[in-house]
Amino acid sequence: MTAPTGPTETGEIAEFEQEFSSAQATPGRTPLVIKLLVAATFVVILNETTLVNAVPTLMTDFSISETTAQWSLTVFMLTMAAVIPVTGWFLQRVPTRTAYATAMITFSVGTLVAAVAPSFGALLVGRVIQAGGTAVMMPLLMTTLMTVVAAEDRGRVMGQVTLAMSCAPALGPTVSGVLLHFGPWRLIFAVMLPIAMLVGFFGFRNLENVGESTRTPVSWLSVVLAAVGFSSFVYGLSLVGGDGLDLAVGALSVSLGATAAPIAFIGAGVLLVAGFAAYQIVLQRSERPLLDLRTLRHRNFAVSLVLMSAGFMAFLGSMILLPLYLQNLRGLSELETGLLVMPGGLAMGLLGPQVGKIYDRIGSRPLVIPGSIAMVALLFGLSRIGVETPYALILALHVALMASLAMIFTPVFTIGLGDLAPHLYSHGSSLLGTLQQVAGAVGTALLVVIMTNRTEDLATSGASDADAFMGGLQWAFTAGAVIGVVVVAMALLLPSKVEAPEGAVVGH
């Protein structure tokens, strides 16, 4: 027997239904809430790569080594890996507007701290704060999209998300290269701050709360295990191929070699992440997990997760190789390199919405299978470039590679999250975001090690510096193509579309 509903409760339910309905879009139109979140996501993700060109300037201004200066990039990635696993719980606990305000205020505060940083340590603090805000935005965008957009229209809207995810990282180095021509590295943050504040203010004014909030308690042990585990694992990967690490704790000083340091951190990270996963399974019995791993019971989501992880390993790992080739071997400046790779990022972003529309009509397989095969072929094509390969050919290969990735990522995001029940959207988005960070770090470390080892072997055998570097680069691109074979295999396991789970938005 259902308990009677009082006037106050009835009014609250009616108010929620009206608010939720107004947030939804009619087919063919993108909800305002999604447009606002895409704009904010673009701003915060753009910031992730803006310091790539500023490393030499940071070295001069703070009198630090290149290895130390690289921490301005590494610490952002570590923070993202540590914070994203918590966002599944956070997004279920707070309303949409609160999550948005938290993300944008945190990001803006971090940007301000970085802009006025009197020391390199203060700059790192600012970058950590920035990354904390950034870590919330992508899962928030994905969760909201899955909640308010009808299943038959998600491909098109997900394509707009791809626009933010791919264009922003591609534009970051180019934007910073231009700004560094006109002023010091602080100008990057000075320009970013008012943009972030305006986007945050306008977005908050026009944003509506979407979905229902729950009041599950936080498991602080889970938070610690996730934060320390994922960040240790990613940090260990960032040390691969380096010179090791010197640790000083009180009077104890320990020097870890180039092999021991990454193994120690990666091993500790794996153990802690395994402990985190086991503890989530225990917490699921009382419906209190920080990250609900029952998402992995959904076949299409699990397949999509493997596919996306392999795709990001090949994608991000290969994308760090091309700038190394263009700058170290061909002698291009950072700005010239950024301008050469920018068309590929723009192509991927601009194709996203069109690919999404096609997915809504014909499903995933006619897009993802040819796209994954093309990705493998193009990565193999990049493994054949040489010292005198025309820039036009490199540009064409890169643009084609980005186009093939657009054919993969937009449908797979849509079909993977679409396989989940609504109450798992936030957890699925968080798990996807976490594995993106980890897969990117794994791919980067793996391909750089392959390139470095092959280069050293060729140099020892008497090859010239240019030939040795080129040989290592070719092996690394070939390894990226091999990883891409996993993407092809997973693509063959995907259905064309998934049926919307019970309770999901299926139409209007």
Image (tube, rainbow, N blue to C red):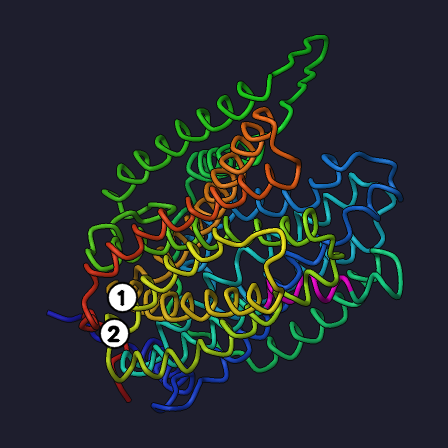
What kind of element bears circle 2? helix
Q: Is residue 20 magenta?
A: no
Q: Pick whichever, 80 or 105, lies toward us.
A: 80
Q: Residue at x 67, y 63 (%)?
A: 172
Q: Which residue is mark 1?
A: 369
Quarter holding the C terminus? Answer: bottom left
Residue furthest to the left in view is 1
In the depicted structure, whether residue 235 falls above or below residue 180: above
Whether residue 41 is visible, yes or no, is no
Residues under numbered marks 2 and 1 in contact, where contact means CB atoms less than 8 Å apart: yes
What segment carries the magenta color?
Answer: 168-177
Quarter holding the N terminus? Answer: bottom left
Sort mark 1 into few (<14), some (14-19) or many (20+) by Cα contacts within 10 Å. many
Q: Residue at x 53, y 26 (%)?
A: 262
Residue 272 screen position, x and y as percent: 42, 29
Q: Residue at x 51, y 44 (%)?
A: 444
Residue 280: quadrant of the picture? top left
Q: Which residue is mark 2?
A: 366
Chief SS of the magenta region: helix
Q: Is residue 342 left or right of residue 442?
A: right
Q: Residue at x 55, y 66 (%)?
A: 393
Q: Pick whichever, 404 or 155, lies toward us.
A: 404
Q: What amino acid is found at the position of numbered circle 2 in the picture?
A: Pro
Q: Is residue 173 magenta?
A: yes
Residue 349 screen position, x and y as percent: 51, 73
Q: Pick whichever, 144 or 350, lies toward us.
A: 350
Q: Is residue 149 left or right of residue 451?
A: left
Whether residue 303 is visible, yes or no, is yes
- For residue 253, which numbered disc appears in the image? none
In the depicted structure, whether residue 101 falls above or below residue 347: above
Residue 333: quadrant of the picture? bottom right
Q: Is residue 9 left or right of residue 188?
A: left
